[in-house]
Amino acid sequence: MKLRISQIELKNFKAFSHIVIKPGADFNVIIGENSVGKSTIFEAIQLWDKCYKTYILASRKGFYKSSKSTSRYVNYQDIDFLRITKDEDLFHNPKDSSLGKCAEITISLPNDSHDAITWSLGFKITCPTSIENAFYRVQPIDDQNFSNFAEVFCASGGYLDEAIFIYQTRPVSGVHQF
């Protein structure tokens, strides 16, 4: 099954209060002035991938079920690809009472064999109020989309950890510092 990202939606994530990006199927170029969010788009995709992997069951054929009281966690030290110095740097406006320390990253994947089916796989990412720079709480925005995706993908003989491949890149300036 061939999957390509058809849409990326970010809410309260770093440089963006809300943005929807619809990349082309084969090739995309992102240009802009410094500090407008070009690298942030790639950081969001990598963070989404980290969240996705934390939700895959050991059997690799399904996802952990979540409720409002259960979460999975991503450790702060495991997200060194993000250019942040403290946990609240992940959020566009951590002081906004309506959003607070919460971001959402959703990636939409169309099913190439069924034009009408698109899975919107989104995560809500929050940081705890009681401890700083330790971890982020992660929850799927819509469990049913994840379940539907797993059912179709695994029925074709695949494993969920093989469904998505994100090649990690870094800006040239970041590569130079290492």
Image: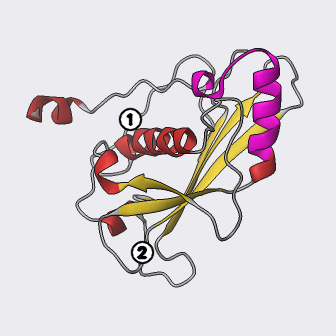
Q: Farthest residue in the front direction? A: 59
Which residue in the structure is indicated by mark 2? 94
Q: Which residues are magenta?
A: 145-163
- Give the mark, 1 or 2, whose residue is nearer the N terminus: 1
> Total marks drawn?
2
Decide if residue 169 is on the left or right side of residue 8.
left
The Cα–Cα distance between marks 1 and 2, rounded to whole angstroms, is 27 Å
Q: Is residue 12 visible?
A: no
Does residue 148 show up magenta in the picture? Answer: yes
Examine the rendered structure and indicate whether residue 42 appears above or below residue 100: above
Looking at the rendered structure, the kind of residue marked 1 is Ile
Q: Nearer the viewer, mark 1 or mark 2?
A: 2
Secondary-structure class at tag 1: loop
85 or 156: which is nearer to us? 156
Q: Farthest residue in the bottom direction? A: 97
Q: Choose top left, top right, bottom left or bottom right for residue 157.
A: top right
The location of residue 32, given as percent across then percent down, is: 36, 41
Which residue in the structure is indicated by mark 1? 31
Q: Residue at x 59, y 21 (%)?
A: 162
